[in-house]
Amino acid sequence: RNVVFSELELGYYLVDSTTGTLCSLDTTQTDVVMTEKNKEPAVDKKIKDGENSVDENTASIGDTVEFKVIIDVKDGAENYVLHDKMSDGLTFNGVENIKVLLDGVEQEAAGKYVAVSGGTETGTEEDPKCTFEVKFENSFLATLTDDNVLVVTYTATVNKNAVIAGEGNPNEAKLDYGDDSSTEWDKTVTKVFDLDIFKYTN
């Protein structure tokens, strides 16, 4: 999309957009092409199923399910906060089980990210609060470029509140970024099925 501002005085202008950008007009450059200060990152949530990564799996009550969120980092990465929301049928196994990998290499949390149970977002009955959040330090994000990929892994246990059959048990994740932007929620589903047992006597 092209937007034209004409007959502006020379000076600095902050142009508000979904991700924010800054430009200046001066005597040597009266025509300016602007680029977004913060490009929109891509987020892909998956379930680890053996050697595969899937959007939907099956499990039994008591089983451990391993999730991962793949974040395609963009130049100018800033204020990245990963939000994760689990349904009642999944019990989060704690922030101590969260791992962050940069291009396949596990990262120490110190100076790079902070993981906390619960979330800062206000929840409602229809849209409950996050199960946990991972906040990435801007000093760490400043070292990353378009070529980098962050992967966040964590686990949950299927509990007795799990939905049997039907729509299954969803787990959602999204990423806040920039000044006031966020991706859409990306969802996986874990399904639990009834197992009918018949006992016969001779």
Image (tube, rainbow, N blue to C red):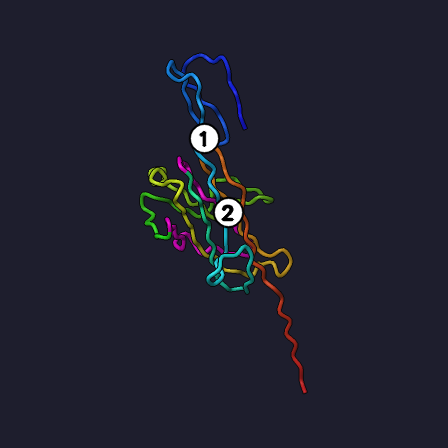
Mark 2: which amino acid?
Ala
Query: On the rendered image, what quadrant is the N terminus found in?
Result: top right
Q: Name the spot of residue 132 as percent of width and height, x first.
A: 46, 47
Q: Residue at x 38, y 50 (%)?
A: 100
Q: Nearer the viewer, residue 75 or 179?
A: 75
The alpha-carbon separation of the residues under discs 1 and 2 comes to: 24 Å
Label 1 amino acid? Answer: Glu
Q: Is residue 120 above or below residue 50?
A: above
- Look at the numbered disc 2 and give the secondary structure of its residue: strand
Q: Are marks 1 and 2 in contact (CB under 8 Å)?
A: no
First of labels 1, 2 by sequence position: 1
Please report the bounds of the magenta region as a residue range.
75-103
Instruction: Report the residue that reaches farthest toward the bottom.
Output: 202
Q: Position of residue 108 (x, y in %)?
A: 32, 49
Which of 55/134 is in front? 55
Q: Is 66 or 129 nearer to us in this picture? A: 66
State the image quarter where residue 12 is shown: top left
Q: Position of residue 83 (x, y in %)?
A: 48, 44
Q: Count of labels shown?
A: 2
In the image, is 121 to the left or to the right of 95? Answer: right
- For the residue carrying disc 1, how many other residues have a C-alpha within 10 Å: few (<14), some (14-19), or many (20+)? some
Say what secondary structure mark 1 lies in: loop
1 or 2: mark nearer the eye: 1
The numbered dot on residue 36 is 1
Does 99 sit above or below residue 198? above
Identify the residue at image location x=45%, y=30%.
36
Q: Which residue is mark 2?
A: 173
Work out whether 53 lies above or below 119. below
Q: Residue at x 40, y 41 (%)?
A: 146
Q: Position of residue 46 (x, y in %)?
A: 50, 53
Does the magenta-highlighted stretch encompass residue 19? no
Residue 202: which disc?
none
